Image (cartoon, rainbow, N blue to C red):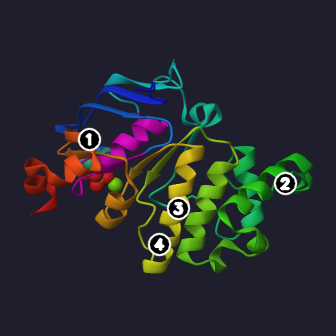
Amino acid sequence: MTEPILDIRGISKSFGALRASNNINIDLRAGEIHALIGPNGAGKSTLIKQIAGGLRPDTGSVHFDGQDITALSTAARARLGMGRTFQISSLAMEYTVLQNAVLGALGHRGDVFRFFRPVMKDAGLLATARASLEQVGLEEFHDARVSELSHGQRRQLEVAVALTLSPKVFLMDEPMAGLGAEGSHRLMGFLDQLRHKAPILLVEHDMDAVFTLADRISVLVYGGIIATGPVEDIRGNPIVQSAYLGE
Ligand code: ADP
Ligand code: MG
């Protein structure tokens, strides 16, 4: 078996009396989509935040590409190749598709254009931004404002922004949310390809998408992982069915 590129070891996190993460072990290996499923409030987003660096675990560690990154900031993790898309969109709505991609390539998420217009003339940043837009099929829309894009196109743009930093892994928290059938279908096709470039830890509610895309599934209930395994095993697991799938 290949070494995991992302290895979460024994993470726990409490908010007051609430144990949002309870001794979680999960890993991600080359080429795979590992889906994380569980009911609302199970702790999926809390776990993703601890892996991305926005939230510090109380105990446990995060290993990425052979390195213990538990103490590193979100920005440092992104520079090492941890890509992510957000449950709440981080796009700058009033800016264009290309400007958002350039912001991504800069590693900034804030409103820097007002102060720093020359970045839009930086040939290296522009080339990176355009290449990422091309990879997600948004190159024709580079001059459109984000506010003019469909939900599906915004999701594609979020992935393009993440791609500007050449991620080695992707963390995605409910990327299908708010997409119609067609948008979901297109995004699924895209993720199916993307996994070969960078494996994906995918939090997703849409079970059809999960069962179609995932190589492995972990089931989170009340902050703890109750099962991990290949899709067929999880689908047929009676504990999973009663605890989560409601069957
Ligand atoms: P999920 O993404 O699986 O729906 P979350 O990770 O968002 O669940 O939340 C897990 C639990 O932790 C919920 O009960 C939520 O209310 C609580 N929670 C999340 N973030 C915080 C926080 N910053 N402070 C207090 N409680 C929080
Ligand atoms: Mg969530």
Which amino acid type is marked by label 1?
Answer: Gly
State which tag comes first along the sequence, 4 or 2: 2
Q: Quadrant of residue 13?
A: top left
Of the pair 241 and 53, the residue shown nearer to us: 241
* Residue 194 drawn at (x, y percent): 56, 52
144 relative to 197 in the view: left or right: right
Quote the CA–CA distance across marks 4 and 2: 29 Å
- The answer to whether residue 75 is magenta is no
Q: Crowding near pointer 4: few (<14 within 10 Å), some, many (20+)?
A: some
Q: Dividing the image into four quarters, tell me where ligand 2 lies.
A: bottom left
* Residue 81 drawn at (x, y percent): 61, 36
Which amino acid type is marked by label 4?
Answer: His
183 relative to 125 in the view: left or right: left
Which amino acid type is marked by label 3?
Answer: Ser
Which quadrant, please, contains the C terminus?
A: bottom left
Residue at 86% over, 57% down? 120
Q: Crowding near pointer 2: few (<14 within 10 Å), some, many (20+)?
A: some
Which residue has dot 3 on it?
89
The disc at residue 126 is 2
Give the SS element for disc 2. Answer: helix
State which tag comes first along the sequence, 1 or 3: 3
Q: Nearer the viewer, mark 4 or mark 2?
A: 4
Q: Nearer the viewer, mark 1 or mark 3?
A: 1
Residue 100 seen in render? no
User: CB atoms at circles 1 and 3 under 8 Å apart?
Assistant: no
